[in-house]
Image: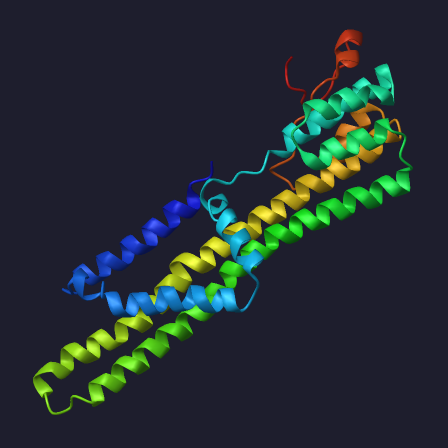
Amino acid sequence: MDPMTLIGIAIAFGAMVAMALLEGASITSLLLPAPMILVFGGTIAVAIASGTVRDAVRAVRALPQAFVGKVPAPRAVIDDLVTTAERARREGLLALEQEAESTSDPIMKSGLQSIADGTDPAELRTMLEDSVDTRIAEKRGAAKFFMTMGGFAPTVGIIGTVVSLTHVLENLSEPDKLGHMIAAAFVATLWGLVSANFMWLPIGGKLTRLADMEEQRLSIVVEGLMAVQAGAQPRGLRERLSAMVPAGRAPREKASPEERAAGIPVPGAVPA
């Protein structure tokens, strides 16, 4: 679990509350039901109107991922692929059918099964890349939904302020109430800006980042599976896949069973 999105949003709201208190403002004066209903309800409504029902459903389902989502580390993925390559060289490609049954990743499962079935390499790559593109497109679609909400929210807040100011102008005959009414009018703009910059845009950004990390992981999976089908040597495969990982996230090398048995030293290897 990566709690940074939740922590960041909490700190942002905390800073806003702290500012209000330091300025001597009342927190209850910011929690007015009418402008909040317009800003949140209107933003969600126009975001749904700008897409499809499926887009909204995917966004709702993806929302928890912004707070608890975690992409498996490249090291774990590379270790699994190297282990698979070792088994393929030792037992043959048909043994990968059992590997397919034990994995929970749909793309990995499909790839291993296709390799065991003797699928043509070009056809296998096309199939895997299409599957990756479809999965990433779904994740980016959910992220785009929240980014769209972040774009609409400030404008919806301004609409709320204009509506409230219209009401203010209708009551110019009561000057003792104008200050309170004008202050309340700008609460809609406040919540439009706050919801966009403290909630929707950070959530959309986090989901976009998770989609990028997932795309990187799946790229490693695709290249690893193609190498396994081609009969790549495990250590060479590890070096090749590790080169696809950005600095700071690359796994340390781990000696294969054959290398440990032969006593071959592997630089930076993780002890068995």
Figure quadrant of residue 144: bottom right
Q: Position of residue 95 (x, y in %)?
A: 82, 19
**Can I make out residue 122 in this image?**
yes
Give the quarter of the figure containing the C terminus.
top right
> What is the number of callouts on the image?
0
Q: Residue furthest left?
A: 176
At x 66% / y 27%, what residue is drawn? 252
**Can I make out residue 243 in this image?**
no
At x 70% / y 25%, what residue is drawn? 80
Q: Nearer the viewer, residue 47 or 181?
A: 47
Figure quadrant of residue 99: top right
Q: Nearer the viewer, residue 204 or 164?
A: 164
Q: Which residue lies furthest to the bottom in this view?
A: 173
Q: In this view, does 60 lie above or below 259?
A: below
Figure quadrant of residue 188: bottom left
Q: Where is residue 65 in the image (x, y as percent from the top left)?
A: 50, 44
Q: Where is residue 101 in the image (x, y as percent from the top left)?
A: 72, 23
At x 51% / y 47%, what residue is drawn? 61
Q: Is residue 169 above or below residue 21?
A: below
Q: Nearer the viewer, residue 212 or 241?
A: 212
